Image (cartoon, rainbow, N blue to C red):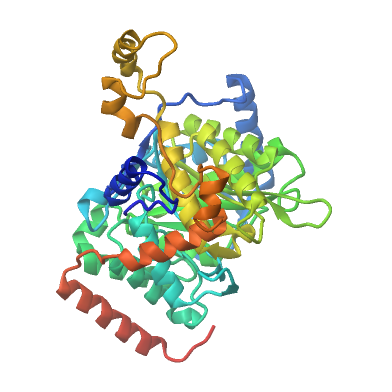
């Protein structure tokens, strides 16, 4: 992705520096290798008490698995089953959870885009699931397949987006039974990064695996992970048949699953930070354990989607202090279980790209970074509690994620000795702008964002007095104009299109 600078230049030197930055091709950034310490809120004894509360939920209250195949698997494994209620002993549960891998490598069709998560490695992915977009003219409307393709192109170009994503937006102009085919194809065709699969039915999950096999080959998909998919628990304490069908398909095919309780703290959980985490922990672990019943060693990512609920309106809120606390607690639990974990990043309830959107998204993401998540979903474009994907915010967020990537890597401690020489070369009361060290390091010493304006008022006004929202839309338009499709073998492309055509004929004119 090329980094563009929308700020006006006033001098030859500044103009030359801007041109150098705008002409520089930014390569794909590898997964962030964490250099910051973790923030653990609980002592070892307190963490075990929280774990014990989750075990009591599963042993005494139980969790519903609303699927006959799942019930049969749990009964065979030795869980206590009454109708659809499954009570899982802690020894059985933890023996199963221990089979899930600590690290997961997600292969891309371009091997240089392959990523590994777990431990201290983190990846960022775009927002997921919005039925609306805030478009290039700043208008909110239903999303279309053209929007979906555009966001796939933007995700491909964004340096710190490690996956293209999944449901970048819901293409409302395509019937639901056929929608997944077009989304899968767009994710594969317009980007060469790893992607996310469909989960809204068993058949759609099977179609996704089939399309992945066209790209990678049957044996490779069977033995390697090439995609990640979301399985949402219906909090409180229900895994439904739709999600379980998708889990069965993906786990059996060795594909990674995000086991994600959909937490509205205070509504779908008790109105307590610790109690909410105890419940979601029980829900997520039960899902991970189930995947191991399907296929021991199935790649599973522990996590949650978090919002607190306004007690004034019942609406979900983002960026609150309690969400940061919950993320830190979940991160501490994930490290205890030796599981990679996910959460959501640049989230906001704002309807516009405004101060609320910036404050909430940055505060939420900073808490995520401190908590140490391995898979950060919704790190670009997220508005209106996931109901809207914004072109402008996508670009603004993408630049922010480059900065979060640098922040999370921590300090380069080896540079200290070299900088002492620069101090020796400068007289007291002078400056460092012309020193050898500054000339050698000025480009990489400090990140210079292009979409955040740091000009004087006069310079900013002369350049059109553009606010951040306008600069974001301009950047999206430029990126889409400059986009170049990554290569894809013509035979694979034709086979994908043929598969889609055959499946659409088989699906027929169903609209549900």
Locate residue 141, reporting x and y percent. Answer: 59, 75
Locate residue 282, reporting x and y percent. Answer: 60, 43
> In this orientation, does residue 166 appear?
yes
Front residue of this view, candidates 39 and 159: 159
- Does residue 496 lie above or below 313 as drawn? below
Left or right of 72 on screen, residue 33 = left
Left or right of 194 on screen, residue 322 = right
- Does residue 7 lie above or below 278 as drawn? below
Locate residue 37, reporting x and y percent. Answer: 48, 23
Locate residue 122, reporting x and y percent. Answer: 40, 40
Front residue of this view, candidates 72 and 239: 239
Query: Residue drawn 69% across and 38% down?
Result: 322
* Residue 367 figure quarter: top right
Left or right of 451 on screen, residue 13 = left
Q: How many labels does the image show?
A: 0
Front residue of this view, candidates 207 and 202: 207
> In this orientation, does residue 281 appear?
no
Left or right of 407 on screen, residue 350 = right
Query: Residue drawn 54% across and 83% down?
Result: 512
In which quadrant is the N terminus drawn?
bottom left
Query: Residue drawn 46% across and 56% down?
Result: 395
* Residue 32 figure quarter: top left
């Amino acid at each position: 992705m090329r980094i563009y600078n929308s700020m006006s230049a006033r001098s030859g030197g500044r103009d030359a520096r801007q041109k150098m930055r705008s002409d520089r091709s930014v390569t794909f950034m590898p997964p962030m290798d964490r250099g910051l310490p973790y923030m653990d809120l609980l002592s070892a004894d307190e963490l075990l008490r929280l774990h014990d509360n989750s075990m009591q939920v599963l042993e005494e209250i139980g969790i519903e698995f609303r699927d006959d195949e799942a019930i049969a698997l749990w009964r065979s494994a030795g869980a206590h089953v009454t109708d659809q209620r499954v009570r899982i002993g802690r020894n059985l549960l933890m023996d199963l959870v221990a089979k899930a891998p600590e690290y997961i490598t997600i292969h891309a069709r371009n091997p240089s885009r392959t990523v590994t998560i777990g431990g201290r490695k983190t990846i960022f992915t775009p927002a997921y699931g919005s039925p609306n977009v805030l478009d290039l003219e700043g208008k909110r409307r239903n999303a279309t397949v053209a929007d979906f393709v555009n966001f796939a192109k933007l995700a491909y170009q964004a340096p710190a987006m490690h996956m293209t994503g999944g449901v970048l937006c819901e293409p409302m102009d395509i019937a639901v039974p056929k929608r997944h085919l077009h989304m899968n194809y767009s994710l594969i065709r317009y980007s060469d990064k790893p992607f996310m699969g469909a989960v809204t039915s068993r058949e759609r999950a099977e179609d996704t695996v089939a399309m992945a096999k066209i790209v990678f080959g049957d044996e490779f998909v069977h033995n390697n992970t090439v995609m990640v998919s979301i399985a949402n628990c219906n909090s409180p304490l229900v895994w439904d048949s739709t999600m379980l069908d998708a889990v069965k398909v993906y786990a059996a095919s060795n594909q990674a699953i995000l086991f994600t309780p959909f937490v509205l703290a205070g509504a779908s959980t008790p109105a307590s930070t610790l109690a909410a985490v105890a419940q979601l922990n029980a829900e997520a672990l039960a899902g991970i354990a189930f995947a191991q019943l399907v296929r021991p060693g199935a790649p599973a990512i522990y996590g949650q989607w978090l919002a607190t609920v306004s007690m004034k309106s019942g609406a979900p809120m983002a960026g609150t202090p309690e969400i940061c606390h919950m993320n830190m607690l979940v991160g501490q639990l994930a490290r205890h279980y030796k599981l990679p974990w996910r959460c959501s990043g640049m989230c906001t309830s704002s309807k516009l790209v405004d101060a609320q959107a910036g404050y909430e998204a940055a505060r939420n993401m900073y808490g995520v970074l401190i908590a140490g998540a391995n898979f950060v979903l919704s790190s670009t474009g997220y508005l209106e509690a996931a109901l809207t994907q914004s072109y402008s915010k996508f670009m603004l967020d993408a630049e922010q994620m480059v900065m979060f990537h640098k922040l999370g890597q921590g300090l380069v401690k080896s540079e200290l000795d070299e900088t002492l020489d620069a101090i020796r070369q400068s007289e007291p009361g002078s400056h460092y702008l012309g020193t050898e060290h500054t000339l050698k390091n000025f480009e990489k010493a400090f990140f210079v964002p292009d979409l955040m304006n740091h000009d004087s008022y006069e310079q900013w006004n002369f350049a059109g007095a553009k606010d951040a929202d306008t600069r974001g839309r301009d950047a999206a338009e430029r990126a889409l104009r400059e986009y170049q499709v990554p290569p894809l073998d013509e035979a694979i492309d034709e086979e994908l299109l043929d598969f889609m055509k055959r499946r659409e004929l088989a699906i027929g004119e169903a609209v549900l």
